[in-house]
Image: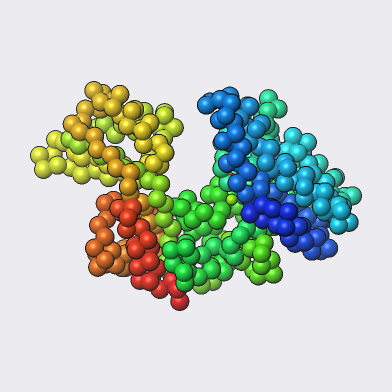
Amino acid sequence: MKIKVLKFGGTSVGSVEAIKRSANIICDWSKKSKVIVVLSAMSGETDRLINLTKSFSKSPNPVDFDNAISTGENLSCALMSIYLNNQKTKSKFLHSWQIPIMTSSEHMKSRILSINKNFLLNELENLDVLIVPGFQGINERREITTLGRGGSDTSAVAVAAAMDAECIIYTDVEGVFTTDPNIVPNAKKINKISYEEMLELASQGAKVLQTRSVELAMRKNTKLSVRSSLKPKKIGTIITDEESVLEKNTVSGIAYTKDEAKITLSRVLDKPGVSSKIFGPLSKGNINVDMILQNISQDGKFANLSFTLPRADLEKALKIIKKEKSKIGYKKIISSNNISKISVVGVGMRSHAGVAQTLFDTLGKNKINIQVITTSEIKISILIDEEHTDLAVKKLHQAFKLHK
Ligand code: ASP
Ligand code: MG
């Protein structure tokens, strides 16, 4: 049985017209193969549901909360199925508990553990299209769980991986771009990109795909692409293994995030075990520390230590560090939240020197100060003042000739 998995994001099911438009794409595919459709909630709906819960409780219990916020996807699925059946495309909406899509036990950030492939295959025998809600599953207690914001991408890739099928993500942009076209109007659509590069770009702020979906596709070697539901005939961006990307760019794309914060501890004792006293409690508090920078002071006894974290976690982190002050032993704590991170990504960095130099040069010429630098094999990330974000992205895009 030939199967395609098609995922439609919030804007592609955001209105009556959008649902009908996406339904036409589904009908077309269904003439060539069986189709499993994974849908997001209508755009804005999940935010609305989250806010709605706040009218009743500041901290609803996670079971109630997931029950509430998972309903948006179910509505889009039901509406899509009504329309497809009306168009004589035989379709059925299956809730995640019917399949089931099993997840880990925790709520709001569950991971998909398994999907009943045979059940889906059986159902597909007599249908053209199966419709599955994204963003959710059930845990071993048979409670509805959700996968974290943007989780429908991960649902779609997980279904595709389970069915050994290709996954096409339909969204409101034509594909993955060399950088955010809102900042750089002549940013170019990337035709093919490796899983690894996509993973770096997604985790560094490119918002087209949820990071976990790319991770999963890479692990399962799932054929994955991004297309626009407004221009469905255009091949968007294909995300594939590195060997299949013939044109290996030194730099493929530039991503940025503005939701960063930095904490600096001054005069931390420079001795073994100190870092674990700082980062241990933070990790227990579920705070994801990203970049870490330590410089040893002249006398060799004390160091200054800076690290970055999501801005949303700043208050919580400060509280934890202040509570641990006597155990860690530092003089002052300074924090800032008007910073952003810019990342330059490309597999060609493995074999080409000079990327860092071009980057430093470009920022230097534009009087943009770099606060922290980190590198990996295929990525260089820098931390700068938030107000320079757009300028830095523009100038780097130019310097690496990504518009060409
Ligand atoms: N509706 C969910 C969200 O807005 C999941 C998704 O659309 O991917 O985060
Ligand atoms: Mg999304």
- Regarding residue 27, the answer to whether it shows in the image is yes
Left or right: where 145 falls relative to 313 = right
Q: Position of residue 113 (x, y in %)?
A: 65, 37
What residue is rendered at 51% in x and 57% in y? 198
Q: Compared with residue 300, is residue 89 higher up or lower down, i.e. above or below? A: below
Q: Position of residue 377 (x, y in %)?
A: 40, 57
Rendering colour mode: rainbow
Q: How many marks are shown on the rendered structure?
A: 0
What residue is rendered at 73% in x and 54% in y? 16
What residue is rendered at 42% in x and 28% in y? 284
Between 92 and 166, the one lying in front of the other is 92
Q: Compared with residue 195, is residue 136 higher up or lower down, i.e. above or below? A: above
As drawn, the residue found furthest toward the front would be 55
Left or right: where 359 falls relative to 55 = left
- Regarding residue 103, the answer to whether it shows in the image is no
As drawn, the residue found furthest toward the bottom would be 404
What residue is rendered at 55% in x and 30% in y? 54
Between 244 and 169, the one lying in front of the other is 169
Q: Compared with residue 54, is residue 9 higher up or lower down, i.e. above or below? A: below
Q: Position of residue 130 (x, y in %)?
A: 79, 49
Left or right: where 265 falls relative to 190 = left
Quarter containing the C terminus: bottom left
Q: State which quadrant residue 286 falls in.
A: top left
Quarter containing the N terminus: bottom right
Q: State which quadrant residue 110 falls in.
A: top right
Q: Position of residue 312 (x, y in %)?
A: 42, 39
Left or right: where 362 falls relative to 398 = left
